[in-house]
Image (tube, rainbow, N blue to C red):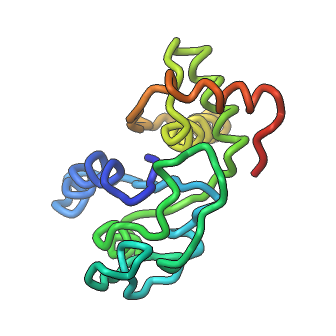
Amino acid sequence: MKAGGGSNFGGLAFPFLGEQLAGRRTVRAVAVEPASCPSLTRGRYDYDFGDTAGTTPLMKMHTLGHAFTPPAIHAGGLRYHGMSPIVSHLKELGLVEAVAVPQTACFEAGVAFARAEGIVPAPESTHAVRAAIDAALACRESGESKAVVFALSGHGHFDMQAYLDHFAGRLTD
């Protein structure tokens, strides 16, 4: 599931993690973030402000630092310097994994998804699509049968310029 600040990820993953903590099932919860804003995969687990001005209370979270200026990527909703405190804590407990993916691989996955499903995903959602495709390909390769669940949390109808930039080779990682 894509992870920017953590709310969409938490909304989908937490019920499954609750089932795991109750001993009823085993799940693998993977938070997928942009390689250019890798708070969970490369940020420090520390107290930091939730805003760039430094006016919020300090929160313990994975953070790139509240002064972090994200690069110009096309996944605007995934440009936050930190991760929610609860998602960060669950990662520290080993209940959540995190991966960072580059934007060109995400857009390739978004195009493949649109061609297969007829839905153009929002750039933010292409991160989850990329991870879901990778998980399905790994299952095919290993011969395992697993359910792969991800959330498509937005369509890309307002992001067509980003897709045009992708097709023109103007997007970089």
* Residue at horizontal 27 percent and vertical 57 percent from the top: 17
Which of the two residues, 5 or 14, is positioned nearer the viewer here?
A: 5
Percent x, y for residue 90?
33, 70
| Residue 69 against residue 168 in the figure, above or below | below
| Residue 17 against residue 67 in the figure, above or below | above
User: Which residue occupies the extreme left position in the image?
Assistant: 22
* Residue at horizontal 78 percent and vertical 47 percent from the top: 172
Which of the two residues, 23 or 151, is positioned nearer the viewer here?
A: 151
* Residue 107 in sight from this viewpoint: yes
Q: Quadrant of residue 51?
A: bottom left
Percent x, y for residue 162?
65, 32
Which of the two residues, 151 or 19, is positioned nearer the viewer here?
A: 151
| Residue 45 against residue 78 in the figure, above or below | below
Percent x, y for residue 10?
29, 54
Q: Is residue 110 left or right of residue 19?
A: right
* Residue at horizontal 45 percent and vertical 83 percent from the top: 45
Q: Is residue 32 left or right of residue 89?
A: right
Q: Is residue 22 left or right of residue 161?
A: left
* Residue at horizontal 64 percent and vertical 49 percent from the top: 73
Q: Quadrant of residue 26?
A: bottom left
* Residue 144 in sight from this viewpoint: no
